[in-house]
């Protein structure tokens, strides 16, 4: 099922053709992400599904799965964040088009003839999936520095997807 994936693709043409690309990339090849990782010796698996929606928009749905080894910000030991995220996006040429998108589609801004750098897109998605302050679940911390220290109960649960959703809601500033 793994294909030879080019580094850069023409997303407009792939959308026209309804193509699906899937494969994997080494985390070590993503420098901004690798800087945050304690272990870059893994791959990220991805699937990109290009197509058109009802309104004839060119769309791409990105699925990524990766195990990211991060430093827990509570105990400073390593922790693994399992990322399994699906992001529906629409290809847009500029901010005006981006603003007109329905809420469920994230804008993927590209010049009309521009190519899409797959590794960069995936790296951006993984960066978004990392919480601002990654932590183990409370019981998994090896040396809790502030045992029993007050932490608002609502923040207890580490749910990267909730955080991702928050980022997505407020985060499209470009
Ligand atoms: Zn910890």
Image (spheres, grey):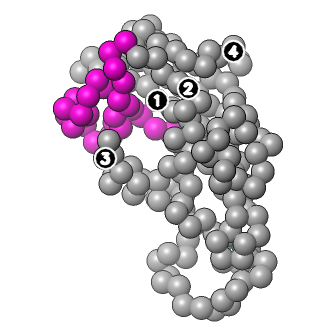
Mark-to-mark CA distance, 4 and 2: 14 Å
Mark-to-mark CA distance, 4 and 3: 34 Å
In the image, 4 versus 96, the foreground residue is 96
For residue 29, side relative to residue 118 (left or right): right
Residue 113: x %, y % from top left: 37, 12
Element type where label 4 sits in the image: loop
**Which residue lies at the image location 79% right of the left edge and 77% below the top edge?**
142
Q: Is mark 2 within 8 Å of ligand 1?
A: no
Do the CB atoms of the residues marked 1 and 3 lie less than 8 Å apart? Answer: no
Q: Residues within 10 Å of mark 4 (few under 14, many from 20)?
A: few
Residue 63: x %, y % from top left: 55, 34
**Which residue lies at the image location 69% right of the left edge and 30% below the top edge?**
25
Element type where label 1 sits in the image: strand
Reading the image, the residue beneath label 3 is: 173
Reading the image, the residue beneath label 2 is: 118
Which one is earlier in the sequence, the residue at label 2 or at label 3?
2
- Closer to the eye: label 4 or 2: 2
- Closer to the eye: label 1 or 2: 2
Mark-to-mark CA distance, 1 and 2: 12 Å
Which one is earlier in the sequence, the residue at label 1 or at label 2?
1
Q: Is mark 4 within 8 Å of ligand 1?
A: no
Q: Is residue 156 above or below residue 100?
A: below
**Which residue lies at the image location 70% right of the left edge and 86% below the top edge?**
145
Reading the image, the residue beneath label 4 is: 3
Could you tell me how many numbered marks the image carries? 4
């Amino acid at each position: 099922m793994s294909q030879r994936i080019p580094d850069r693709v023409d997303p407009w043409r792939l959308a026209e053709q309804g193509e699906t690309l899937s494969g994997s990339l080494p985390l070590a090849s993503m420098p901004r992400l690798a800087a945050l990782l304690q272990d870059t010796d893994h791959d990220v698996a991805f699937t990109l599904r290009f197509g058109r929606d009802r309104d004839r928009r060119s769309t791409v749905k990105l699925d990524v799965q990766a195990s990211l080894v991060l430093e827990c910000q509570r105990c400073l030991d390593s922790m693994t964040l399992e990322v399994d995220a699906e992001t529906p996006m629409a290809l847009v040429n500029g901010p005006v088009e981006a603003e007109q998108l329905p809420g469920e589609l994230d804008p993927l801004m590209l010049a009309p003839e521009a190519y899409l750098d797959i590794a960069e897109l995936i790296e951006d998605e993984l960066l978004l999936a990392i919480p601002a302050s990654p932590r183990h679940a409370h019981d998994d911390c090896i040396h809790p520095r502030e045992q029993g220290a007050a932490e608002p109960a609502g923040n207890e649960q580490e749910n990267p997807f909730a955080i991702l959703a928050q980022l997505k809601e407020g985060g499209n500033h470009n």
